[in-house]
Amino acid sequence: MRLNFAERHNNLWMFLFKNPEKEKCHWPGWDEIDYPILDRCFACEAALRLAPVGHYKCHDCPLIWPNGDICNYPGGSLYNCWIDSKGDLEQRSRFAKKIADLVWVSPKFFIIDKDWIYKK
């Protein structure tokens, strides 16, 4: 099964935008995928697959994060803000939409199946 990771990323985060009370694990799209995705994050999985074995780094993320604050940036990343906003569903929804709209370095590159990444 080949997946367009950029498209799936957007679908996941649009689901969370429309359903701010939900977590990533609640996205119904997981049922269509027959292999695990690192941290339930398509960008993390893509970075892992692009890196030489044993050299995966968060800084290899294919998403263009505002101010270069990748998802695990302490305290200031959009992802951390989404996690921390559980008590405010309106704010949580806004953060999910911003993450859905993040630009991929090269979205056509990230067509992935269980074992490989393909250039489209």
Image (cartoon, helix red, strand yellow):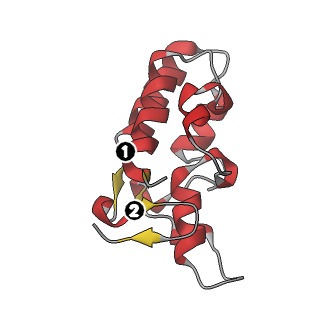
Viewer-closest of 20 and 108: 108
Return the x and y of residue 10 as percentages of the image width and height.
40, 39
The circle on residue 7 is 1
Extreme residue toward the right, this view: 54
Where's residue 82, x and y in %?
58, 33
Q: Is residue 77 left or right of residue 84?
A: left
Q: Going 45% across and 43% down the picture, which residue do you hit?
A: 9
Q: Residues within 10 Å of mark 1 (few under 14, many from 20)?
A: some
> SS of the residue at dot 2?
loop
Q: Which mark is residue 19?
A: none
Vertical placement of residue 61 versus 42, above or below: below
**Mark 2 crowdedness (10 Å alpha carbons): few <14, some 14-19, many ≥20:** many
Q: Which residue is mark 2?
A: 110
Q: Quadrant of the C terminus?
A: bottom left
Q: Is residue 36 left or right of residue 116?
A: right
Q: Position of residue 113 (x, y in %)?
A: 50, 60
**Drawn side of residue 56 relative to residue 118, left or right:** right
In this picture, is 114 found above or below 50? above
N-term-proximal mark, 1 vs 2: 1
- Which amino acid type is shown beneath numbered disc 1? Glu
Q: Position of residue 3 (x, y in %)?
A: 44, 51
Q: Nearer the viewer, residue 64 or 32?
A: 32
Furthest toward the front, the residue is 1
C-alpha distance separating marks 1 and 2: 9 Å
* Kind of residue indicated by mark 2: Phe
Whether pointer 1 and pointer 2 mark residues with C-beta atoms closer than 8 Å, the reply is: no
Number of numbered discs overlaid on the protein picture: 2
Query: Which residue appears at 60% of the width and 69% of the height?
Result: 48
Residue at position x 42%, y 34% in the image: 11
Q: Secondary structure at mark 1?
A: helix
Q: Horizontally, is 107 left or right of 80 in the view?
A: left
